[in-house]
Structures are given as structure tokens and as C-alpha cells.
Amino acid sequence: MTDRLDIEVADAAGAANVKADPPKRKVFTRTYGCQMNVYDSERMNDVLAPQGYSVTEDLADADLVILNTCHIREKAAEKVYSELGRIRKVKEERALAGKDMMVGVAGCVAQAEGEEISRRAPIVDMVFGPQSYHRLPKLLEEAASGKKVVETEFDIDAKFEHLSERAARPVQKRPPAAFLTVQEGCDKFCTFCVVPYTRGAEVSRSVAQIVAEAEQMAAGGVREITLLGQNVNGWHGEAPDGKTWGLGRLLRRLSEIDGLDRLRYTTSHPRDMDDELIDAHRDLKTLMPYLHLPVQSGSDKILAAMNRKHTRDEYFRLIDRIREASPDIAMSCDFIVGFPGETDQDFEDTMDLIRRVEYGSAFSFKYSQRPGTPGATMADQVPEDVKSARLAELQALVTSQQTAFNASRLGMTCDVLFERKGRNPGQLVGKSPWLQPVPVDAPEALIGTIQAVEIVEIGSNSLFGRLVAGHHASNGSSHDVIKEAAFDA
Ligand code: SAM
Ligand code: SF4
């Protein structure tokens, strides 16, 4: 176990490259979309700390506002423009009080729309894509001189280099569960998806870079790492042995890191689930029994039109192999309803696939036409009301499966990693091995520890539990011993 009291804890402002007494300022960051954006937003705050910025949750208090955006569906982009309208009012109020406010739009909407953003919303001072945030201090300087900044270069190597420099800095105290980006971009070009255009070609970080960052995170108190990538299981990185490793091999290496007890990865593509990765689910106690493996549709015709390059039968065979390796695994998925040309029968094929697989959870979306993608101009676009009806039907099925999966945990004792205080006094919230939140009455000292918890009640998303004093977790557990001595309930 990592003794967190002995860690040299540097606050963010104590990191390298500190300029002499930068003025104290506040940054308000709003994050849209996927976990990769959450990770990027955290790194933006890291980059800004040596510039004198601390994080505020209060928009009116912010000298700098950053919207880290998502372009995956139309609604996501529209949300950004309506948020910019709200920010304009706050900026005007601050101006009346003689206070400045700089506004930046980052992420995939910035990458896709570039200058169009400051044209549509003139309050925006900086527009920068997901590969540019490490250049924020420079961009801020340019914006402060009155220039409208637009930075949408694809310089992924420079971004990864920046992340590695960060790993060489003094250890910072970190939350118990955190993300680590290992791969960015996508070469698969599914016909509905903007990612290959907004995030660029697929690039993997090297084993040395990832291990250094993971070691630093573990030293800072991180017990669970979720490896991130648009196609995370397509990761293939240069290794110290001169070979190219796949994700299964990387997970084996990361599971050797002291203090790192739990590993997850997301999001995966069915075509990249190789034997080594499936074996890792069988062999590694650190690898949690949860897998998000989107199929999008259960119809072979729609899968082909989406350019997914696999069939429903291949997906079923894959699920069988995964469940053979890890029988208790919670399967998760993404579905799109109403892709162009989807008939009632195609939709029924999707429902049939869901019934056969039985998911622990799933995300589902109405198809959204994205400009520049092949799907946007395909014939036979599905009417909105049909999409809505199909989505409601699919979500009802998935919810019933999720409820059944959660109900099957009732009475089990499992390991829970406590991450934060809960809503009620005296309550902590942690994650089960299958990724459900678990509220438990427990002392605050247990945050950052893994404890055996008996599941006593089931909510729609959560499992409610109680601490099991002196009991070793026995079901669905990644560990067979309780490692912490802090138990004093
Ligand atoms: N790489 C992952 C994969 O291959 O499944 C998906 C990553 S994508 C960022 C997340 C999810 O957004 C997709 O799985 C898909 O279900 C959904 N999505 C992407 N484009 C969409 C669109 N045009 N309309 C609706 N949903 C979309
Ligand atoms: Fe988008 Fe995923 Fe397809 Fe890549 S594999 S194009 S990220 S849906």
C-alpha cells in the first residue's frame, strides 16, 4: 500500500515553470462530452496553475472561462452556443464592475468550427482544438494583446510530450480514481462519426510515457486508473523491449505498479478485442470486471452501412469469449437508433441483440447528422418521431436489464473503492468492481481505501451497501484481502 502521508505533496502552483509571483486569477471550466474531455480539462487546469490560476465553480468569479466542448451530436454543439449567451451576460456584468473576463472555447467544437465560433459569439477570445491546450499560456498572452486566437493544429506529438514532462514533476496529491489518456484519434471512419475529423489520426503514447505517468499517479494516491482512448483497445505502443505492445500487455505491466489496485479502459471497438486483451480479463485481478464494447446496431445491413467492419454473429462470438474469460463481467454498450436506412426489422435486430447479450448498462442515442460525415448525406434519413419511439423502446429494455444486473448483486460482498463524500452526512460514495456508484455510511478516513461492502439495497443506477467489518470481499472482488488498516467503523 502506498503510504500517502509520506508523499511529497506539491500543490498545483508549486509545479515546475513557475513564473515569479503571477497575479492570482480564477478559471471556470465547463466540460462537455466524453471522459477524454474530462481528462483534458484537468490537464488545462494543471497548465494554468503556474500562471496563477486557481479553479472556481462560480462563473461570476472567473477571470478566465473555458468551455471544453464535444461535437459528437448536434445538441452538444448547440448547448455550447446557448452557454456562450449566458456567459456574455456575466461578462457584461463584470465589465460594469471594472473586471475583465477572457473566454476560450476548446475541444472538438472548436476544432470543427474554428473561426466560425468567434463570428457567431464575438465574446470568445480564444478557440483551440483538443491538441493545443498545452499551449494555453502562449494563447492567453496573444488574446490579452487583443488578438482573436484560433489554434486548431493537429500536433498530437507535442501534446503527448507535454503530458510526459508533467509526469516528471513533483508528485501531486490526486483523487483515488483518475483517467489516463493512452491513445487519441481514430482511423476507423464509421460513417456517422466526427471523431476522425475532430481528433485526427490514431496516435498511441509509448509504454514508457504511460508507465511514468501511471507511477506518478499511484504515488499521488490514485488507486484506480481508467485508460482512455477513442479506440483504446486499438492502442499499440513502442515498448522498452523494442517490440510493439498491445493493450493486454500494457495492462499486465501497469498491474505491477505498487499501490495501483484497479484498472479499467474505455472505449473499445469490437474489432480490436484480441486474445491477449481477453486473457488479461481472465488473469489480472487488477482489471475490473466491466467492459464497454459498443456495437451501435444489431443489424448486419446497418453495421455495414456504418462501416463497423464486423457482423452481429462476430460480436456474439466475441461476447462468448469475453464471458468465458471473465464470467461475471458487466457488459456495457453504445447504441444508435435511426441510422439512415434503419427499418423496423433492423431495429428489431438490435433489440434481439440486446436481449441475447444482456447488458449491465448501456448508452443510447438518436442518430444525429454530422456535417462532413458520409451518414449525413445518405438517403433514407429516419424521421425524428420514429427515432424517438425506437429510443424509448430500447432504453426501456436496457433499463430492465440494468435493474436485473444490479438486483443480482443484492446480498453480495464486494470491494468498493471510496472516492468522495456522499450526499448525506456520514456517507461516502465509492465504485463497485462493475462500476456502479455505491453509497455507504462510512468514516471520511476511508476515502481512498478499498473496503469490503455488502450490497443491501438496489437503486436504478446505484448499489447501496454497508461496511463488512473484518470480512474479506468474496464476490466479484478484485482483491481477496482488505488492504487498509484504517477501518474503524
Ligand atoms: N470509439 C467508440 C466506438 O467505436 O464505438 C465510440 C466513441 S464515440 C465518441 C461515443 C458514442 O457516441 C458512439 O459509440 C456512438 O454511439 C455515439 N455517436 C457517435 N456519433 C454519433 C452520431 N452521429 N449520432 C448519434 N450518436 C453518435
Ligand atoms: Fe467514431 Fe469510434 Fe467509429 Fe472511431 S471507431 S469513427 S471514434 S465511432
Image (tube, rainbow, N blue to C red):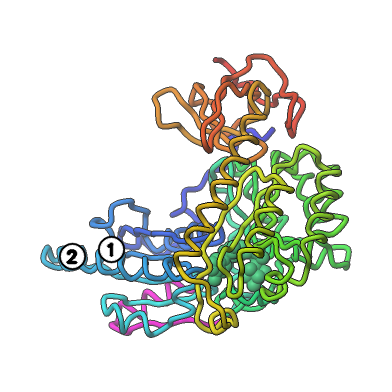
Check whether the beta carbons of the residues at disc 2 and disc 1 lie within 8 A of each other: yes
Q: Position of residue 346 (x, y in %)?
A: 66, 65
Q: Residue furthest front?
A: 344
The structure residue drawn at horizontal position 84% and vertical position 55%, both measured from the top left corner, is 317
**Badge 1: few (under 14), some or many (20 or more) residues near its Cα, within 10 Å?**
many
* Magenta region includes residue 148: yes
Instruction: Give the quadrant of the C terminus.
Output: top right
Q: Which percent across, then down, holds residue 161? A: 63, 70
Q: Tell me which amino acid carries mark 2.
A: Lys
Taking the spot 37% from the left edge, 54% from the top edge, the residue there is: 54
Q: How packed is label 2: few (under 14 Cα within 10 Å), some, or many (20 or more)?
A: few
Q: Badge 1 is on which residue? A: 63
What percent of the width, then of the height, locates residue 99? 18, 65
Circle 1 SS class: loop
Determine the image quadrant of residue 406.
Answer: top right
Bounds of the magenta span?
134-154
Residue 164 seen in this snapshot = no
For disc 2, the marked residue is: 99
